[in-house]
Amino acid sequence: MSLPPGPPPTAARRPGSWCRRALPALLVVLLTVTGCGLRLDSAPPPPPPPDAVESVRQEAARGAVRLQRAAEAAAPEDEAVGAALAEVAETSAAHAESLGGVWEAWPDGVPAGTDHTPSPAPAVPGAGTAEAVLAELVASTEAAREQALTVPDADLAALLGSVVVRRTWAAVDLARALELEPGVSAGAPYPVPALQAWQMDSRTVEALDAARYTYEVVGARSEAERRERAARRAEELRPLAEAAATQAAQDPRRGAYPVPGDGSAAAAAEERVLRQWVFRVSVAPRDARPELIEAAVHTAGELRAWGGTLPPLPGIG
């Protein structure tokens, strides 16, 4: 079978032929553009204004960078303060990255002839003291909380809720090192009636019930103050698990759950509950966010009290 005929042999040897054919059309386009009053060398237009979600994201990222720079610039008074400041700087850098960083229209500088003035870089507050960092940390925690409660995007709300949790306990650590009051809320258990107001995911039910069972086992294995703490926490979780089960499509609760005997069981159970509170921020009605974030902060405190540590984004990473 013979192949269809190809282009004449001379076609591949005449690279200038396209230019000669296209040049008249290109001149017409250029004349049309200049005739409309446009200049090919005019400055680029300013960037479009951000929408509500992007405005919150950008402001949150700027707040994280500002806090990071404040912690890095502060002079530690002793080793404990230095460790707390390093924790603030490290987690703030992770928050800024998770939030997408501070957006700049022209990172290399504004083009000549452009009227757009970029926002100044986040300033470092205070005079380089740890006390100033604590004040900024408390203020940024409340700012992130307000953003989490009001932002239209549910996923961004959950991310900001996680930021609130981490900043809260970073403020507690820094305040303790400075022998000051932290000035932040330690959260509160989730109210039982609120769990009966909307559909509940079976994973949330199971996390709450498994934590309740874990504390019963931990209490049985413990003595004195540790036994009392475990019993108290089990009683907090029991009505939550029962209320959540009534709102689930299927009741996933079991008679027993695996409980490690190495001392990590309570913290691991709290970590699973914490993940559910943060997750539910992304799926719950907006008016349910305040209680969920408070519950996440409270659960993170319980996790720490039982020997656990918080990552930069508790409940997420």
Image: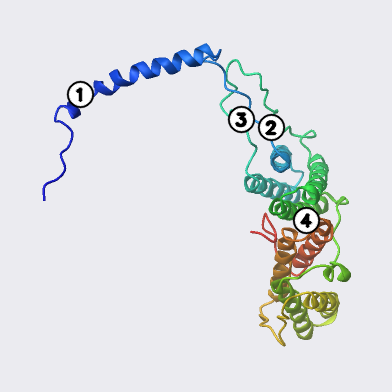
231 or 173: which is nearer to us? 231
Residue type at the position of mark 3: Ala
Query: What's the coloring here?
Result: rainbow
Whether tag 3 and tag 2 are in contact, CB under 8 A, the answer is no
Whether tag 3 and tag 4 are in contact, CB under 8 A, the answer is no
Sequence-earlier tag: 2 or 4: 2
What percent of the width, then of the height, locates residue 199?
77, 69
Mark 3 vs mark 4: give the one in front: 3
- Which label sits on residue 105? 3
105 or 93: which is nearer to us? 105
In three-dimensional space, the C-alpha distance between marks 2 and 4, rounded to whole angstroms, equals 35 Å
Neighbourhood count class around disc 2 (C-alpha, 10 Å): few under 14, some 14–19, many 20 upward: few
**In this rendering, is residue 298 above or below 9?**
below
Whether tag 3 and tag 1 are in contact, CB under 8 A, the answer is no
In three-dimensional space, the C-alpha distance between marks 2 and 1, rounded to whole angstroms, equals 49 Å
Mark 2 vs mark 1: give the one in front: 1
What percent of the width, then of the height, locates residue 284?
76, 61
- Which label sits on residue 14? 1
Neighbourhood count class around disc 1 (C-alpha, 10 Å): few under 14, some 14–19, many 20 upward: few
Identify the residue shown where x is 33% and y is 21%.
22
Whether tag 1 and tag 4 are in contact, CB under 8 A, the answer is no
| Residue 149 makes an appearance in the image | yes
Mark 2 vs mark 4: give the one in front: 2
What percent of the width, then of the height, locates residue 159?
70, 53
**In this rendering, is residue 29 above or below 95?**
above
* Relative horizontal placement of residue 208, taking residue 44 as reference (left or right): right
Mark 1 vs mark 4: give the one in front: 1
Q: Which residue is mark 4?
A: 169
Identify the residue shown where x is 57% and y is 18%.
43
Sequence-earlier tag: 3 or 2: 2
- Which label sits on residue 49? 2
What secondary structure is found at the residue carrying circle 2? loop
